[in-house]
Each structure stands twice: as structure tokens, then as C-alpha cells.
Image (tube, rainbow, N blue to C red):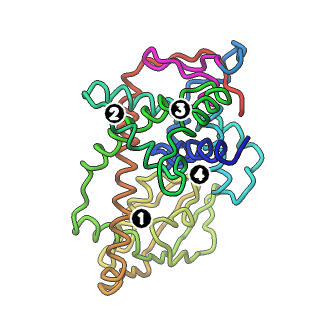
Amino acid sequence: MSDYEVRPMLDIIRRKANSWATRIIFATIVLVFIFFFGYNQIFVPNQGPQAVLVRVNGFDIRQNEFSLAYKGVLESYKQVFKGEIPDGMSKMVVNTTLQQLINQRLLIDAAQKMGLRVSDEELAKTIENSKQFQKDGKFDRSAYRDYFLPTFQRETGLNYEDLLRNELLAKKIDDLLHSSVKVSPKEAQDAYRLNKTKFTFQVIKTGTDGKPLPRQTVGPITLDEREQLFGKEASDTDYAKVFALTSEAPDLALPLTIAGVQYSIHLIKKDTPADGAWVKDQATFTQDYLLRKQGRVSQEWISHLTSKATIEQLSAPHEG
């Protein structure tokens, strides 16, 4: 396989890895398990590259498309884990890949219902502007049509331009959705203050035997570091009560009981970021906060589309 052939194939894999679904890959992992339809329960054997894995609103997602997307998702995981996937996570890569393809199909269906489309001119412009298909700064039409397209079809069993058109259509509705998400300066500053404020607490625990344990000082910690207080057993409501404490009202009205242990919490100190820090971090934090907010909106939108969709499991995917 020549370098010209390899680079465009890697390009589409990278685009799939960087699609909106995997840009928030670890946020999406939560959705994978919420909307994962029990593939372990499938007993129909996979019949090869053309095997239909899942049918989404009547559209078939096949093994060969999964195999191409799987390479991109696997690469994303490797980048996060610095090269090697931890033991036991290979199934998660498979699940994430399949969920990505389901999400993309849901977006395409939604875009089509809204009357969105990708014109032949848009598709051609995207291809011609791709550096992978240029030679000496110009689009190499002959190499693209006569060499790359048939090779890609032969190697993957997929039509490159159909895949690209679908990606562009999904991106259109994704961009439309994200453009509707706004962050006001006050909202960003309030979020910054909340995320950067450091709390120091005195913690008194009463064990399951009813005997008080030695007092502990926890902090200074930010809201993102809250698990240092109670671990993963506490609910968001529990944490909200603790981080709402102020110097005027530094104690919980009632102790919290978490996993059989009773906690009495006293706020020792609360350090809010200085105004100068906000001025310095404003641009970067606002952009990051906007991206996180867009990610949440995307998750909510996919949740809504999934609840309305007809999704049939037909056979189990295999890696690669």
C-alpha cells in the first residue's frame, strides 16, 4: 500500500476519532452505558464485513463501517492512556465505537428531517481542499479518482464520498446546535469563581459502631476535588450542602450519613480567586467553559434522539 493510499485512509480514521462524539469521549462513556443495548446478550454470530450490527431507524450499521471507526476510537484511547489501553478496557473501546456510529446516524436523521443537506459542491470543495489529496498545492484529481477511491472501496468495502457526506451532514447539525449555546460574561465569571474557590473543612466522623473517630482537616480543595471528602459514595445533593457552607453559616444543620458513617462538617476557610486571576484567565476559561456546556447540550440532544429512535441489535461487533 503506497503512502498516498495510506494517508487519506488515516485521515478519515482521524476525522472519525475527532468527530463530535469522540471529542467528548470520556463524557460519552457515561452515555455508552446508559444507551448500550446489551450487546453481550446477542447470540447471532457476526457474518463478516457486511454483517449488520445495529439498525437505527431502518438504517443498517455494518461491521466494515464499525472496523474503520474502531481504529479511530482505539487511537483516541491510546492517546489518552499514553500508548497502551489498560487491561479490561477493550470492550469499552468497542462499545464507544458502536455508540459513536449510532449517535452519528441519529444526527444524520435529525439533520435530514430539518431539511439540511450536503450539496455536491460542498462535498467537492471539501475533497479538493483536503491536503491529503493535493500534489504541489493542487488537487490531484486523477490520483484521487483513479487510484484512491477504488483502493479505499476495495480495502474497506465502503464508499469514501458517502462516508464523507454523512460526516459533513452530522457536522452541520452539530455546528448548528453548538452555535445556539451561549455563555454570558457573568455566567463565565460565576463558574470560574465556583470552580477555583478553595475550601478547607474540619471533618468529624462517627463510625458504624457509634464511636467518634479522630477529627480530620480536608483541604484546601476545589469543587472538582470534592471526592477527597466522602469518596464516590456521596450524592451530588450531599456535596451541594457542604460546598454551600459560608463563614456566616459554617456548619451543616444536620450530619450527613454516607455508607453508614456519620459526618459532621465545619467550614474552616474559603478562599475565592482574586479579581486579577479572573482577568488573566478570562479568555481561556470562558472558551473551555463554553466547550463543556456545548458537550452537555450535545449529550442531552443525543439522549432525546435516542429516546425517540428505533434501535435494533442484530449481531455482535468484533474488533478491527
Give the CA distance from mark 4 to mark 3: 57 Å
Q: Are marks 2 and 3 in contact (CB under 8 Å)?
A: no
Q: Which one is earlier in the sequence, the residue at label 4 or at label 2? A: 2
Judge whether 88 appears above or below 318 on screen. below
Q: Are marks 4 and 2 in contact (CB under 8 Å)?
A: no
- Residue where numbered disc 3 is placed: 160
Q: Reading the chain from its start, which is encountered first: label 4 or label 1?
A: 1
Residue 67 appears in which quarter of the rendering? top right
**Tag 2 secondary structure:** loop
Q: Does label 3 or label 1 sit earlier along the sequence?
A: 3
175 with respect to 204 (left or right): left
Which residue carries the number 4 mark? Answer: 260
Q: Amino acid at mark 2?
A: Val
Q: Which residue is mark 1?
A: 242
User: In terms of depth relative to the viewer, which is nearer, 148 or 168?
Assistant: 148
**Screen quadrant of the C terminus:** top right
- Residue type for callout 1: Val
Q: Are marks 2 and 1 in contact (CB under 8 Å)?
A: no
- Residue underneath mark 2: 118
Q: Specify the segment rendered in magenta.
A: 50-66
Provide residue 311's location: percent of width, then percent of height. 48, 19
Q: Residue at 48% of width from left, 32% of height from top?
A: 161
Observer-nearest of 311 and 196: 311
Q: Residues within 10 Å of mark 2 (few under 14, many from 20)?
A: some
- Between circles 4 and 1, the one closer to the viewer is 1
Q: Is residue 175 magenta?
A: no
Q: Quadrant of residue 110?
A: top left
